[in-house]
Amino acid sequence: MTEIDHEKVMTMSDRMTKVVLTIGGSDSGGGAGIQADLKTFCVLGLHGTCAITAITAQNTLGVQKVFGLDPEIVAEQLRSISDDFPVAFAKTGMLHTAGVVNAVADHLRERKIPFVLDPVIEAEAGGRLLRPDAVLALKENLIPLASVVTPNIFEARALTGIEVRDRQTADLAAKRILETGAKAVIIKGGHLDCIDLLMTEKGAILLPGERVAGENHGVGCTYSAALTSFLAQGYSMNEAARLAKRFAERALLGSMRLGRGVGPVGHASAAVGWAGCNPAPGTH
């Protein structure tokens, strides 16, 4: 029998594995935030790194306390990661304060790291996660750098002042965000008819989906982490958005009734059969 050259196998594996970065808050209940992102990265075959911006006392009933970290602590985590890992793509989630928003913007700009901006403003189960002054910093300093911004209809209203009720108002909100400098916007339609709107400077396309019954704690984080993963692997924005939506739906189908509130989506369930069902970049 031919002996396996383990060193060669490891080297090949290292070349193939993409490194991604999530910048956000820790969910002590394990369903959303950093925890959901790292689960998603792992399921989709990427190596996930993280910079924690805040620690939450959180469960399925909501967010009881938020302990924000100093911007310098966040900046040190980012420097440590970027000095060692070749980060292919990043995503931002809960940033909490204007100081952290600015520290993150400075780092991503300096290191030229493309990223998905998930404008996490309030927790689905209740609790403010982004301070009002940080919303302005997000609009002025971070959104102009983003490869894509992924608000739900409530976050879109907070960013633009436009109440998203239908396709026309979704178009208006997306255009308003594009005008701030983002390269693409995805208005998530989970609170409407499950049709997402993807808009770039080339125009808008609709991404249909199915309403899936189940526990939905962490579905927004899971979607943006999946989008990050597919973009890191070379998929186009259109392809990545469609695959991320599909992955989030599968996670909803596998959601778990845990705790006394809204249970978490099931990343492990979404992983079943996934490796063989997503096409190579450019073939979808």
Image (spheres, rainbow, N blue to C red):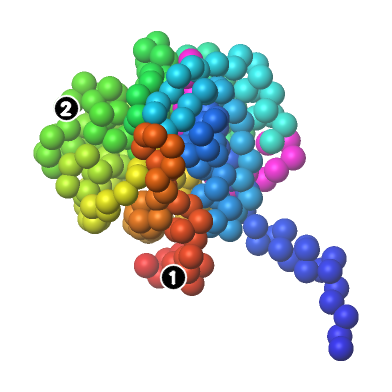
Q: Tell me if 103 is positioned left or right of 1 in this view.
A: left
Report the residue at 43% width, 37% height from top: 259
Q: Is residue 248 visible?
A: no
Query: What percent of the width, then of the height, locates residue 157?
Result: 23, 25
Q: Which mark is residue 16?
A: none
The extreme front residue here reads 260
Disc 1 residue crowd, few under 14, some 14–19, many 20+, Cα 10 Å = few
Span colored in magenta: 82-97
Q: Tell me if 265 is positioned left or right of 26 in this view.
A: left
Figure quadrant of the C terminus: bottom left
What residue is shown with label 2? 163
| Relative height, residue 208 to residue 110 (above, below) | below
Judging depth in this view, the residue of 17 and 154 nearest the camera is 154
The extreme top residue here reads 133
Q: Secondary structure at mark 2?
A: loop
Report the residue at 43% width, 23% height from top: 63
Report the residue at 28% width, 42% height from top: 188
Disc 2 residue crowd, few under 14, some 14–19, many 20+, Cα 10 Å = some
| Relative height, residue 10 to residue 230 (above, below) | below
Q: Tell me if 21 is positioned left or right of 132 in this view.
A: right
